[in-house]
Amino acid sequence: MESRRLRSAGPICDDRVDILGVGVSPINLDDAIATIERWISERSRNYVCIAGVHGVMESRRDQRLRSIHNEAGMVTPDGMPLVWLLRLLGKGNVDRVYGPDLMRKMTAVSSLRGYRQFYYGGAEGVANRLKEVLTAAHPDLEVAGTYCPPFRALTAQEDQTAVDAINAARPHIVWVGLSTPKQEFWMATHLGRVEAPVMVGVGAAFDFLAGTKRQAPLWMQRSGLEWLFRLCSEPRRLWRRYAYIVPGFAILAVGDLVRRAIRSFEKARSGSPLRE
């Protein structure tokens, strides 16, 4: 059983860093856990975007998605490229806050604190399998319910039925596994309708934790090569995504760093105070 004690992490300040138009929270895993627990204790209503390179690049093409990220209660740095950029920009205490890791850690904390979970999303049977796996690992974990929506737009009545089921279960956390950007749109449009304090969009974490899909080896995750593992695992589905995202992000990120360096140099020469 995981230790109840977490490394000290205060409330998250609204000091997000602009990464190609998306404000990313310069945090680590313990910071994210502390913030979620604070929201639960306050009974506030928030949603969390787990932002990787894919989410940032999609947000550049979709203004609504970009707004959803920037209005989220927290935007975690999911991919290592975002972590590296944040560190280059002076955020030294940043670590990857990866969806599966956040879900594992928060599940362990929830089993100790009594936080109720709800799993929304996944392919048919995945959410129930996820429940079996996590309750086997954490017998005190309370999973209040699961719901697998169809792979189509829900009617207004179907959507209301799902919202009613979630609210009747009274969860503290709703984990949303619909993939980006579908899960971000769902959380934003259901904020205020879903009464749980926290909604977290974790995408493929349902499949990874349930054991229905393989995760990349740890060395590939730490090296920023998880995209390559996923591409090799599902080439027909993902090749178009990564053909655009990986080189596009690299070019834009380098360009942004160069522009920041030029602005800092010009401000230093003019004697103006340096600002990020």
Image (cartoon, helix red, strand yellow):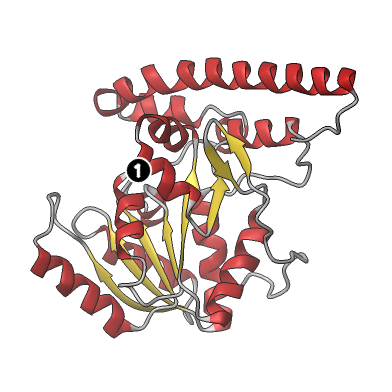
x and y, in percent, of residue 193 in the image: 30, 72
215 sits to left or right of 15: left
x and y, in percent, of residue 207 in the image: 34, 50
x and y, in percent, of residue 152 in the image: 12, 50
153 sits to left or right of 241: left
Who is closer to the viewer here, 83 or 107? 83
Residue 36, quarter of picture: bottom right
Residue found 50% across the figure and 81% down from its top: 43
**Mark 1 belongs to which amino acid?**
Arg
Looking at the image, is 230 positioned above or below residue 148? above
Q: Quadrant of the N terminus?
A: bottom right
Looking at the image, is 133 positioned above or below residue 196? above
Who is closer to the viewer here, 143 or 166? 166
Looking at the image, is 198 positioned above or below residue 57? below
Residue 135, quarter of picture: bottom left
Q: Residues within 10 Å of mark 1 (few under 14, many from 20)?
A: few
Q: Quadrant of the C terminus?
A: top right
Q: Residue 219: tell me if it is visible.
A: no
x and y, in percent, of residue 248 in the image: 46, 18
**Residue bearing the label numbered 1:** 64
Q: Residue 41: tell me if it is visible.
A: yes
Residue found 82% across the figure and 23% down from its top: 267
